[in-house]
Amino acid sequence: MKKTFVRVLVLMLACVMLLGMMAGCTGEDDRRGPVNVRDPYTEPITTDPITITIMTKRHAGTTNDAEDLWFFKYMEYWYAQYGYNVTINVTQAGDPTEQTLLLLGSDSLPDIMWGMTLSEATATAYGVEDNLILDWAPYLNEMVMPNIYKRFQDDPAMLAESTAPDGAVLTLPYIAPAMWHSSPHNVQDGSGLFVRQSWLDACNLDMPTTEKEFFDMLRAFKKLKGPSSVPLADTDMMLEYYLWTCLGYYGGASKYGTSPAIKDGKVVLPCMTEDYRTYIKFMNTLFTEGLIDSRYFSTLSSSAVQAMAASGKLGVFGDWTLGAVGKDYKDYVALPPIPMGGNDDCYLTRLSWYTTGSVWASSKTEYPEVVAMMIDFIYSDEGAFLYRYGPKQGEDPLNLLDGWYYDKNGDITYTEVENGTYANIQDYQRQLIYPIDTAGVRPVVVTSGSGETLTYKDAVTGEDISAKVTLDLNIDNADNYWHKTSSETWRPYATSVKLGSVWLSEDENVEITDLRAVLNNYIASESAKFITGRRPMSEIDEFWDELEQMDIDRYLEIYVNAYAPYMESVFGK
């Protein structure tokens, strides 16, 4: 499918870029001036007290002060092992987007922005043009940042995506390596639809394999539970992402098909294809026949959907997990893709995964090498584990936490989780240990699994991707079961091919931002009208004409050109 030579060439060029960073790290940066990079590990750069300021994003539902999080207190202790006297001051962001722009606009960045996602457009404006953001490139070497340096060596494409056109590395990625049980978490396409097996049995039906069978199943469920019942509901637009996957799109996902995605080896906008007509008809059928809630496009919240699932009202439930259905979790089976609209191939972007723009820093930080030490630590195996899980039980050098231990099934847990103080380990970790998942590396931690290395076959490229068996999915609990049914169903369709971040010129950034704002709003409003019947589907061609008048072709052209090198590396054309 792809030309191996072209892909190898692209990766070689990325490797050359990385080696260039290392070779030039103590030389002259023509754009930013001389960079004198010092070794922060052999001996302290300074013995004076250092204060590192951090603004961090937090997970929803956390209630404690970010200053109290264990990881940042532990880092003060960690720095002391290298002879530094570091105090870390942490501030929690309210509205991350608003505060990012406010801090950049006022030139008052803290030393580190932690999990405060920075777009390439904003990085270009404030990092490349105004030089407010620290360029990590001089520090990406075996002396200062050996862990992220090694990860960039292993995945040169990730480095290329993190590098601005002028060679600066202004942000560092969040990396989620493949694990054998990989679930729909942190993916770009939705696979999280689950069907209630007992309802299929009651209706004498098998799992649907065609669009007609899918609708027949929902109609049968509605008949089974009464005319006022609504058999399907989802959170986070799982149904829409599932539908676009079934129509053959992958590499990116968006409501109404407004974002670039891949189909048949090309970058396209799904909303400008014939598949959009299929999508509208599908959603319109669901809406007009009462197969989805009438509030689906207005006020239906995720919590309301989860409450419907918990009370046993849903035959098809879409969510990131099955926790909401309680003890009935084993009655739900992951719905496999159903090729639609003449499409033959379905692919799901998962496997190894990363996202750029995760962690970045101020160019005015006084000791960039010392700041780099902490950032690099969370890209090490030890640091990634401590960041997420904290200390082992009885081994906290700070004596702040009781710590984790293995339960009888070999899974990591905490006393405060087992006694009900915290609902689950994620709640415990996010409240007490770390601020946000999307920083550093998601640790590959073997708990109840065998630890053996198995292999995924990338469904698009055919490449082998190694992964460890970290969990024994046969242990009977809701989380393991959810992983198991999802993984077994979707593994054959999994790919790492995705449309990641792209760096555009300043003019292109302005143009794409303006176009996106106008187009996305219009597409959303008109799509909802088509689906609910407020605008006849006979006007879809007219709708496309309207989008062309709004320069949607130019919008796509910018992305097609920007993604051309990546697409060539994968598909060789």
Image: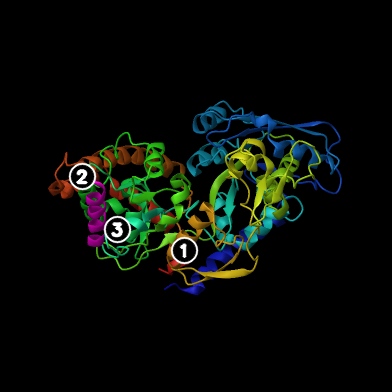
Q: Is residue 546 visible?
A: no
Is 227 placed left or right of 407 in the picture? Answer: left
Q: Which residues are magenta?
A: 211-226
Magenta residue check for 214? yes
The residue singled out by tag 3 in the image is 202
Q: Quadrant of residue 381?
A: bottom right
C-alpha span from label 1 to label 2: 40 Å
- Going from N to C along the chain, the mark reached first, 3 or 1, is 3
Q: Quadrant of residue 297?
A: top left
Identity, as a three-letter code, of the amino acid under mark 1:
Thr
Q: Is residue 329 visible?
A: yes
Image coordinates for residue 389, horizontal then vertical, percent:
67, 46
User: Pointer 3: residues within 10 angstroms few (<14), some, or many (20+)?
Assistant: few
User: Pointer 2: residues within 10 angstroms few (<14), some, or many (20+)?
Assistant: few
Disc 2 secondary structure class: loop
Question: Which quadrant is the C terminus positioned in?
Answer: bottom left
In the rendered structure, are the residues bearing label 1 and label 2 in contact, judged by CB atoms less than 8 Å apart? Answer: no
Mark nearest the camera among 3 and 1 is: 3
Question: Which quadrant is the N terminus positioned in?
Answer: bottom left
Disc 3 secondary structure class: helix
Dominant secondary-structure state across the stretch colored magenta: helix
- Going from N to C along the chain, the mark reached first, 3 or 2, is 3
Mark nearest the camera among 3 and 2 is: 3
* 304 or 254, nearer to the observer: 304
The residue singled out by tag 2 in the image is 227
Image coordinates for residue 454, horizontal then vertical, percent:
58, 70
* 109 or 384, nearer to the observer: 384
C-alpha span from label 3 to label 1: 35 Å
Is 63 placed left or right of 195 in the picture? Answer: right
Q: Which mark is residue 495?
A: 1
Magenta residue check for 360? no
Identity, as a three-letter code, of the amino acid under mark 3:
Ala
